[in-house]
């Protein structure tokens, strides 16, 4: 995993050890029940009372709609993504602790507690490092290490022997306990000889190593399968935008990933008869253009099964944004570690429950935490995360005998993994939101329903659960979680307004469904422009374009002046407008809401587009922006545009006349905001129109409960399509890639 914030580096291992010591040893588990007729079973965890996955008295359904007040409405007739599973990773450190430090009896008990649905919590997904990560016992290793300066392009020395002693036996045991276990594999680095750094730490993949690296994947997959551990998914690289000399890592841009996948990895897997799926990206929520760019290319769209996500930067709603942009591609949360930066036991449990609930609410088919096991000091580490929290702690007792202790991650995962079977479908439910009772609901293959709830508020909450024409009422303590399970079929319909979102289904040529969901919370994730008394919004998937009817010309910069709220001493604002893409303005500190960059155009100008280019510093763009204009540089009024940033942020505007333009960052990030080039464009007067066929376009309209109007266009054809968009009195041209969707919104200002 990546230590993405300074806060994480400063956190105390002692605090983590104290937290782990306060958690109890797992009690004997009772088989999960879907509830008896007319009742729902209830399982509760409340860290403040040291109550852990304790079965409570069942609640009784009452006839009729839920009374007015706080109500979670579940609609099991509205189904979404299938669930692959919940789990974590047997890193080298984790496997060493479980496989060599615990007695056989303790190890078998732990494996039962982790992977058995009947006697444990039923974990069903493992993400395995291919070689060394930032959690190893004895430093770096790959499956084909060579002395410095030497190489092995034929992979004659390839071997997985390192994993045979304690990792593979645990993986086989986990599969034996839970035959529905899914495995994915991810490299933190290729062997050092394949890289420009000649080291597993940092660097890039050498051009002549692309095919040997693809062969390396194939050899690994075949060797693991022969050892009794088939792997269902791989990703080309862990956190490809994080390149560090501290531990195994490698930079792999989206274009490099496309080349490697299309020209090497996918053909090699097919050549060897391997059906392993390839997941793209495997990094944080804050850069959606990377995974989407893999879908804009016809070859990689075919070769990439879906996107793997991490939780260390950005917002989980990015998963829904990318899903709605390319609705045919699934999402997997492949890594999310908690740790001492979350504070005490209550804070730790809150972090896990947020992940378990809001990941699936945003289309994740898996929730994978990080280390399955670490010692009381959060190790052994390989120069990686300090204070990371595992699923269980493995450490010696006072008598020197090693044992294990479940952490908050264990109990949080349990509230879903024990009750949500592989193949379950997430179903519709509203949430009462942050500071109240949050939830996610599933229907299992056996027809039972599981509702996972968590009270993220500071006081106890009494709420209703409505399901068709019946309901029950429950009170949940602050910081507590409850999972409700019940059997049967929904009777009666559900008012769509009670859920708060709308579903927009489309049909692909092969008969499969492309389903888009939308709620008012997504408005902040798309560009919006104020035109008169309305906000007009649009989504713009990577590869799409929305262009005005006339061409654009860049305004001359001769008399421009640039200022900013803050700047690095080496990167002043003037470098953003010097015409040199190799120079930049840089904020000089991690992004905070309220940071701004401002242009004085020298005189009043008319323009309709602003372009903020951060291409030479990927990831350093403003995560969320607002645009203001002024005639005097003092009075700014209301924003005229808002939306999410990207590596190249194109901000479309109604025809605007002003002298001063200010772009304000609205979101925090550990990255420094950088701008390598800023352009302001004016209408040229030359007719222009996006090219593309209209074949395959499907359109649907919808209205949110708050009155926001949606116009959704989906391109089910095999090539890019173009269509007209009447927008603010002007007809724009929209170019939409194959398998992508465009959402246009209208709401009162």
Image (cartoon, grey):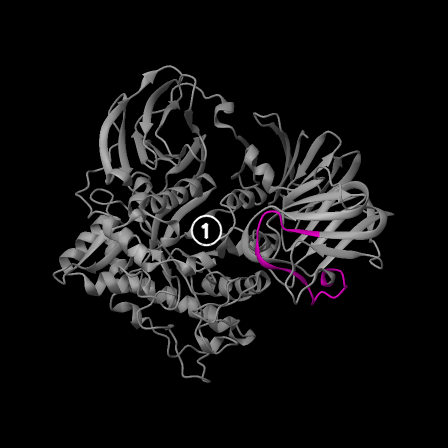
Front position in the image: 267 or 294 = 294
Please state the horizontal and vertical placement of residue 126, each as a whole percent of the image.
34, 54
Which residue is labeled 1 in the image?
Answer: 311
Please state the horizontal and vertical placement of residue 566, each as a whole percent of the image.
64, 57
User: In this view, which residue lies farthest toward the front?
Assistant: 634
Residue pictured at 59% horizontal, 53% vertical? 289
Please state the horizontal and vertical placement of residue 552, each as a whole percent of the image.
81, 50
| Depicted 479 relative to depicted 555: above or below | above
Visible in this render: residue 398?
A: yes
Q: Residues within 10 Å of mark 1 (few under 14, many from 20)?
A: many
User: In this view, which residue lies farthest toward the right?
Assistant: 685
Count of numbered circles in the view? 1
Left or right of 744? Residue 63 is: left
Please state the horizontal and vertical placement of residue 642, each as a whole percent of the image.
66, 42
Residue pictured at 56% horizontal, 53% vertical? 287
Tell me the quarter of the picture where residue 71 sits.
top left
Residue pictured at 56% horizontal, 41% vertical? 324
Task: Name the quarter where the C terminus is drawn.
Answer: top right
Residue pictured at 69% horizontal, 48% vertical? 663
Left or right of 373? Residue 719 is: right
Q: Is residue 714 magenta?
A: no
Front position in the image: 361 or 209 = 361
Where does the magenta region start and end?
575-597
User: In this view, which residue lies farthest toward the top?
Assistant: 64
Task: Name the quarter where the N terminus is drawn.
Answer: bottom left
Q: Is residue 576 magenta?
A: yes
| Depicted 409 relative to depicted 270: above or below | above
| Depicted 200 relative to depicted 467: above or below | below
What element does badge 1 sit on?
Answer: loop
């Amino acid at each position: 995993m990546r230590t993405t914030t300074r806060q994480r580096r400063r956190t105390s291992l002692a605090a983590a050890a104290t937290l782990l010591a306060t958690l109890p040893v797992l009690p004997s588990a009772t088989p999960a029940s879907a509830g008896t007729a007319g009742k729902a079973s209830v399982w509760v965890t409340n860290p403040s009372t040291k109550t852990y996955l304790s079965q409570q008295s069942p609640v009784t359904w009452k006839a009729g709609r839920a009374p007015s007040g706080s109500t979670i409405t579940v609609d099991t007739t509205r189904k979404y993504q299938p669930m692959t599973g919940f789990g974590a990773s047997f890193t080298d450190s984790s496997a060493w602790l479980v496989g060599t430090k615990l007695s056989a009896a303790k190890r078998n008990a732990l494996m039962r507690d982790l992977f058995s649905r009947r006697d444990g919590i039923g974990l069903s997904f493992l993400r395995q490092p291919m070689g060394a990560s930032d959690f190893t016992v004895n430093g770096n290793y790959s499956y084909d290490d060579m002395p410095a300066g030497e190489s092995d392009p034929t992979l004659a020395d390839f071997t997985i022997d390192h994993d045979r002693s304690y990792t593979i036996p645990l993986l086989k045991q986990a599969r034996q306990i839970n035959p529905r276990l899914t495995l994915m594999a991810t490299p933190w680095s290729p062997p050092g000889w394949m890289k420009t750094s000649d080291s597993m730490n940092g660097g890039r993949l050498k051009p002549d190593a692309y095919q040997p690296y693809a062969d390396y994947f194939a050899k690994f997959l075949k060797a693991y399968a022969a050892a009794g551990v088939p792997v269902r998914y791989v990703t080309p690289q862990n956190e490809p935008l994080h390149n560090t000399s501290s531990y195994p890592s490698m930079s792999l841009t989206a274009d490099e990933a496309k080349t490697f996948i299309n020209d090497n990895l996918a053909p090699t897997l097919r050549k060897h008869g391997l059906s392993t799926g390839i997941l793209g990206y495997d990094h944080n929520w804050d850069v959606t253009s990377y995974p989407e760019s893999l879908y804009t290319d016809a070859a990689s769209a075919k070769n990439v099964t879906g996107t793997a996500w991490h939780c260390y930067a950005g917002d989980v709603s990015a998963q829904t944004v990318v899903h709605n942009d390319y609705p045919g591609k699934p999402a997997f949360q492949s890594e999310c570690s908690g740790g001492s930066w979350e504070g005490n036991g209550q804070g730790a449990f809150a972090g896990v429950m947020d992940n378990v609930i809001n990941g699936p609410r945003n289309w994740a088919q898996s929730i994978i935490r990080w280390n399955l096991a670490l010692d009381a000091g959060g190790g052994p580490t390989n120069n990686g995360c300090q204070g990371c929290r595992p699923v269980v702690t493995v450490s010696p007792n006072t008598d020197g005998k090693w044992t294990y202790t479940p952490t908050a991650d264990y109990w949080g995962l349990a509230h879903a993994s024990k009750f949500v079977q592989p193949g379950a479908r997430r179903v519709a439910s509203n949430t009462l939101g942050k500071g109240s009772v949050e939830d996610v609901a599933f229907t299992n293959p056996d027809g039972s329903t599981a509702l996972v709830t968590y009270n993220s508020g500071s006081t106890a909450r009494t709420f209703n659960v409505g399901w068709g024409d019946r309901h029950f009422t429950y009170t949940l303590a602050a910081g507590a979680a409850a999972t409700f399970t019940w059997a049967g079929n929904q009777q009666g319909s559900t008012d769509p307004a009670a859920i708060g979102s709308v579903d927009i289904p489309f049909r692909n040529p092969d008969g499969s469904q492309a389903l888009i969901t939308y709620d008012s919370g997504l408005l902040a994730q798309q560009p919006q422009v104020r035109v008169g008394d309305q906000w007009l919004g649009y989504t713009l998937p990577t590869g799409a374009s929305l262009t005005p009817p006339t061409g654009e010309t860049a305004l001359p910069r001769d008399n421009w002046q640039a200022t900013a709220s803050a700047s690095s001493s080496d990167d002043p604002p003037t470098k953003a407008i010097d015409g040199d893409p190799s120079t930049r303005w840089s904020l000089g500190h991690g992004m905070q809401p309220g940071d701004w960059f401002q242009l004085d155009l020298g005189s009043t100008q008319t323009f309709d587009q602003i372009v903020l280019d951060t291409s030479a510093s990927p990831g350093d763009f403003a995560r969320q922006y607002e645009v203001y204009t002024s005639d005097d540089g003092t009075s700014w009024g209301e924003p005229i545009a808002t939306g999410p940033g990207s590596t190249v942020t194109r901000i479309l505007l109604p025809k605007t006349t002003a002298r001063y333009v200010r772009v304000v960052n609205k979101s925090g990030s550990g990255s420094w905001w950088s701008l390598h080039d800023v352009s302001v464009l004016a209408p040229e007067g030359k007719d222009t129109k996006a090219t593309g066929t209209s074949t395959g376009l499907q359109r649907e309209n919808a209205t949110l409960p708050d009155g926001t109007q949606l116009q959704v266009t989906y391109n089910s054809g095999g090539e890019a399509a173009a269509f007209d968009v009447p927008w603010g009195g002007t007809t724009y041209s929209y170019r939409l890639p194959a398998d992508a969707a465009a959402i246009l919104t209208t709401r009162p200002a």
